[in-house]
Amino acid sequence: MSILHVTLIISMIMLSICLLLNAIRFAIGPTLPDRITAFDLFVANIIGIIIIYTELTDNEDFIDVAMVLSLFGFLGSISFAYYIMKITK
Amino acid sequence: MAGTIDWVLVKEIISCVFILTGVIFMLIASIGLLRFPDFYIRMSAITKGATLGLGLILLGMGVYFNQPGVMLKVLAIIGFTSITAPVAAHVIGRTAVQNRISFWPKTNLKEFEDYITKEHLEQPINHDKYTEDIKEDIRMEMGGGDDADNG
């Protein structure tokens, strides 16, 4: 167990706690924009988990997954916001 | 052998420091999303915290792999994130203001209300948020334009 391995395991555990807190906010969020921001933070946390998994397995191919996911997360947030704006106008 | 530096260990330690700092920022952003009192304050917390944390985690991975191609992809992801996260936050916040999501009672709203009264943007609050209503005063201002378009 090197120091890098221990650090990556600790980081993975902390990001899992982040996902749990986001899920609580996603469940109790009083309004729909709260849930959209929680979804935005879900995407950012999952990109971080993918990055740490890339470093844990020494496989560089997962970086492309993180790049595609960062673009699609933006599209998801924008389309949800646009949908709410159209439906409540 | 005593004077040489183990560069692999130095690289790993720098990567560990970056990754731990980034993960701590993301944890702070998540706690802020759970604990802050208002939608707009939560939005500000997660936009800054998550962007900075993600950038630090990505820089840690770029330092660990130590290759130009990986570093280029890392800089591309940081560029995408730092461009798209404020835009998404702006659009969602604007939608929330249009939907009359309530503010925290201690927020200083004086300037915003002055702007609203100056630009004549007051509207009756529509509690039934998921039905479309046609605003009566706008139809009266337009006069016979609707009939001409329909005919």
Image: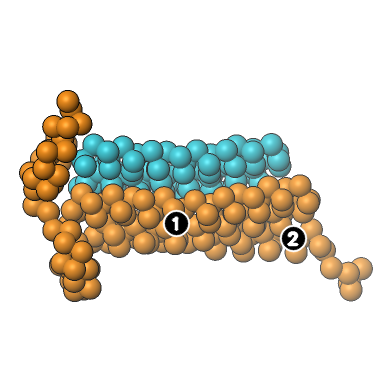
Chain colours: A cyan, B orange
Residue B12 vs residue A35, the one in the foreground: A35
Q: Secondary structure at mark 1?
A: helix
* Picture residue at 89% right of the left edge, 73% below the top: B3
State the residue position of label 1. Answer: B86
* Residue B90 place in picture, x, y as percent: 38, 55
* Picture residue at 18% right of the left edge, 27% below the top: B150
* Residue B10 place in picture, x, y as percent: 75, 64
Q: Secondary structure at mark 2?
A: helix
Q: Amino acid at mark 2?
A: Lys
In the image, residue B108 above or below residue B104: below
Q: Which numbered disc flags the more N-terminal residue, 2 or 1?
A: 2
Q: Quadrant of residue B35?
A: bottom left
Considering the image in quadrants, where does the C terminus of chain A appear? top left
* Residue A72 place in picture, x, y as percent: 50, 38
The alpha-carbon separation of the residues under discs 2 and 1 comes to: 32 Å
Residue A11 vs residue A46, the one in the foreground: A46
**Rendered image: mark on residue B1:** none
- Residues packed near mark 1 inside 10 Å, few (<14), some (14 to 19) or many (20 plus): some
Q: Is residue B130 visible?
A: yes
In the image, residue A37 above or below residue B1: above
Number of marks in the rendered image: 2
- Residues packed near mark 2 inside 10 Å, few (<14), some (14 to 19) or many (20 plus): some
* Residue A55 place in picture, x, y as percent: 66, 46
* Picture residue at 48% right of the left edge, 48% below the top: A44
**Rendered image: mark on residue B11:** 2
Residue farthest to the right?
B1
